[in-house]
Every structure is written in C-alpha cells, then in structure tokens.
Image (cartoon, coloured by chain):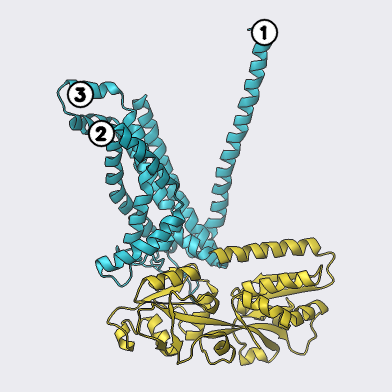
Chain colours: A cyan, B yellow
Amino acid sequence: MNLSDKSNKDSVETIASTIFLILGVINIGFVLLICVYLIIAGLPAIVKIGPIDFLFGTKWASTAADPKFGILPFILTSIYGTAGAIIIGLPLGFFSAVYLAKIASKKVRYVVEPLIDLLAGIPSVVYGFIGMLVLVPSIRTLFGLPDGASLFAAIIVLAVMILPSIIKVSITALEAVPQEYELGSLALGANEIETYYRVIVPAAKSGIAAAVVLGVGRAIGEAMAVMMVAGNAANMPSLFESVRFLTTAVASEMSYSSGLQREALFSIALVLFVFIMMINATLNVLLKRGGVKRK
Amino acid sequence: MKKEILGLMTAACLSAAVSTCAFAADYSVSTDGSTSMEKTIGSLGEAFMEKFDGAAFTYNPTGSGSGIAAAKEGRCDIGLSSRALTDEEKQDLDGTTIALDGIVIVVNPQNPVSDLSVQQIADLYTGKISNWKDIGGADAPVVLIGREAGSGTRDGFETVTGTKDQCKYRQELTATGDVITTVSQNPNAIGYASLAALSDKVKAVTVDGVTASEETVQDGSYKVQRPFVFVTRKGEKLSEGAQAFFDFSFSDEAKPIIIQSGVVPLN
C-alpha cells in the first residue's frame, strides 16, 4: 500500500462522512420543521379555547352554532384503546416470540416468520376494511349490540396491528441473551421451560419493554384502520360505544374544516405529537439501558 | 375520502391553471361560497377554462353564508349558495338554481320500513324515535349513521330535516361509500347519501311516498333535496367573463358535467 493510495482513501472517507452528515442534518431538519410548524399551528387555538377547556372539556361539537372544543374524550379514548391493544397484543406477541425464538423447530420458524413480516406489511386501510366487513358485524351479533362499531372493535384491530412489531423486537431481544446463560441454567438442572422463563426472559426484559413501547407508538398513531371500525362519534369512551381517537378526530374533520375548527384540529395533532414524543423518549431510555446489558 | 382528495387536487390544478394563464385571460370570473358545491363548480370551471382558452376562473370555498355576503358586497362575480335565498336576501340579490342535490335515506334491505315522512326522519335522527317498532319495523334499536362534521351531505341533510346540531349519530363516517357499506352490514342502521352514490346494497326509503330519482328531485316532489344557487346582484350587469360562465353553466353542454358531479341539473 503506497502513500497516494492512503490519501485517496482518506479523501473518499471525508466525502462519505460529509454526505452522511448532510443526510443526517436533513433528517433532523425535517423533525424540527414538523415540530415548529405543529407548535405554531397548534398553539393559537389552545390559547383561544383555553388550555383547561380544550384538554379537559368533555364535549366536542366543532361545527355547531355554539362550538365546543373539548378533547378529553379523544385523549381518554386514545389511552384506553392503546392500553387495551397492549393488554391483548402483548401476551399474544410475547408468547409467540418465546416460542419462535426458543422452542419452535427451524422449519416452523422458517414458515411463520415471513408470515409475521407479511402481517406488518399489510396497509392499515386493509385492516380497517376487513374490520368493517367482518369484525364489526360479528361484534354486533356476538354481544347483541345495536351496532358493532366500538372501542372494542378498534382495540382488536390495533392488537392485531401491533403484533408484528412486538413479536419481531421480542425475538431479537431474546436472541441477544448470551447462550452461556441458557447452557448454565440447563447445566444446573433447570428444565428448558424454566430456563426460558426464569433466565432468558428476565435477561431480555428491557428489549421486551422496548417492544411494548414500540407497539404503543404504533397503536396510538394509527388513524385509518381505527376510523373505519370505531364509529367516530365524539363520546366519552366506553367499551361498546362509538368512540373517536385523537388521530381520527384530526383525520375525519380536516378535509372540510375552516377557521377555529381547523386550528383546533392542529392543536389535537400537537397533543398527539407530545404523546408520541413521550413514548419515543421512553423507548430511547429503555433501549440505551438494554444495550449495555446485551453487549 | 378519495372524493375530497380529488376535490383538493382539482382546486390545486385550478389555482395553478389560473396563475399560469392570468395574463392571457380574456375572461375572468370569480366565485365564492358553498363548500358543498365544490365538486360541481370545480368541474364546471374546469370545462369553462377548457372551452374559452385562457379564461381565468376562481372558486373560494367559504360557505353559503359567506358566498351570499360576498355577492352582495361585490367581492365576487357569482356567489354560490347551497340553500334557497331568504326573502330578505332576495330584495337585492337574484338566485338562479343551477342544480338540485338529492339526498337519499337508506336502510338495510332486511328492514321492513320502506316509507318515512320528513318529520319521522328528523325524529329518528334526534333520538325521539329510538326503536324501529315505533314506525312499523322490527323491535330493534335504531342505529344512526351519518357523515363527519363539515361534510356537505351532512349539512344538506340536517338543514332539510331541521336537525342541525341535534343528531345523535352512532357512527360518523368520512365517505359516502363507508355509509353505504355500514348500512348494508347492519339490519338496524339508517344512513343518508347523495343520490348519485346510491347502490343496490342498501334500500332507499321513499319520503312521504315519493321515491328518490332524478325526476322526483327535479319536479320537487322528493322533499330531501336542496338547491345549488348562483347568487348575483339585482339589476346589475355581470362582467363579460362572468356572463359567459353563467350562460355556459346553464347550457346543454354543461348538463352532463353537472350530472357527473353527482347532482341533478335543473330543467
């Protein structure tokens, strides 16, 4: 290797690092742009309506003669809906992940994993459409309700939608546990199931927590599928009532909105944005903590 | 949803077209008003600009009230209103109906109810009648399906039935197609949709014994309808361009365009 070769390599490296730096800065620029725009667009209505009336008002009637802009029903619905999706989706996803990572034969895993990827790739409008045509009528007949479009239907759809991310991230976390742990446990006389649940899962717990937070993020941000099965009436949340999420509140009224109504929709988006930022911050903390342990 | 996106795109194209040919414009016409008329006026404007090369057409979607005010104050050539003018407004304004928007009331094909009066429809949607058995149907709760706040169809329906801000919707959906699908899935549901969107998956009820069709909307016997009105100032001549657009909109040439946009042209 001669000298000019080396300097050549150096300049290539400099160019490459500059390009990547620019790309990174562009990315950060987008985030900042969205942040700033949402704050500029979202704050005025909150001030006009009053933060207390806006965040804790229970009535939303944006086009009425005497408009009301209370988004507490949307906030609670989003929280309940996401919590419900996690309660159903987490055990399902977690046990599937343990099975696929540790117990399943290679063949089973070979078949099932691509299917889970496929589940992740289905567009949300398809989930919504199937929910509308299959799930909503079934809920109606199963529970003897006047109508099946409800918080419950949304929870089921969201639970299915977050499964892939929970499974995939959990598998990665479980596989990152050093094999010595497993071998040590088996050598000490624990059987396989004991080893998986008492040694490997605790060792992978921060990764699994990250999977949950990722699922929460996906569930709280989903609009299209939810809009088609939740009914979208601005009621206070109740399991078998028609409800409206933060996301659907923005999406359903945006196209025709004007004036204060439109500003209030931006404010809802801002609230949603704050929620998602908090979830991402939690995710970062969890991943950093998990990273040290896994390495 | 798709329709609205199309509408937006049309609007975007329109504004782009307006800005590019503003200098070459022989004719220029500005309209202002009803958001429900967006689709109709958008396609008319597009066809108008195509016919008179270089003509400039603008549409400002502000709502019927603002459109009428804008026409009165001379801020636009033609105001657009999706309701008939009041007697007071008629003192200094002329309203010319360009088309009629019929709204069909749909129920599930299994529902035995096949005729409703306007009052009954209002009572159903305000929750006064909450069980189908009260009006000759099965003993089952009424499930009210409607459109989202701000939708032109919802505005039209609530205006005609006098149920503004009082409807107790079980579901608020964002597209006519979704309303039809939902009603077709639930035997207890009732919904409303534009006449043009009616499909055989659902049953359209007759209102006061009249079936909704182009003819009954045109002759006024079908009650759940509203006019799309061009509002102009009384006794004042329109600008050359506005007059050309006005004449074009009422010509036979414009009829298929109006029908295409989902409403019934006035004969």
Which three-letter amino acid code belongs to the residue tagged 1?
Answer: Leu
Q: CA distance from mark 3 to mark 2?
A: 16 Å
Q: Chain of mark 1?
A: A
Q: Label 2 belongs to which residue?
A: A103
Q: Label 3 belongs to which residue?
A: A185
Q: Nearer the viewer, residue B2 or A104?
A: A104
**Badge 3 and badge 1 both on one subunit:** yes
Number of other residues with Cα within 10 Å of mark 2, as a class: few under 14, some 14 to 19, many 20 or more: some
> Which residue is pictured at 31% across the width and 48% down the height?
A89
Q: Residue A36, percent across and down? A: 57, 48
> Which residue is pictured at 32% across the width and 85% down the height?
B137
Query: Quadrant location of the C terminus of chain B?
Result: bottom right
Q: Chain of mark 3?
A: A
Which three-letter amino acid code belongs to the residue tagged 2?
Answer: Ile
Which three-letter amino acid code belongs to the residue tagged 3?
Answer: Ser
Number of other residues with Cα within 10 Å of mark 1, as a class: few under 14, some 14 to 19, many 20 or more: few
Number of other residues with Cα within 10 Å of mark 3, as a class: few under 14, some 14 to 19, many 20 or more: some
Query: Would residue A264 appear left or right of A140 to someone viewing this image?
Result: right
Q: Label 1 belongs to which residue?
A: A3
For marks 1 and 2 on the same chain, the one whose residue lies earlier in the sequence: 1
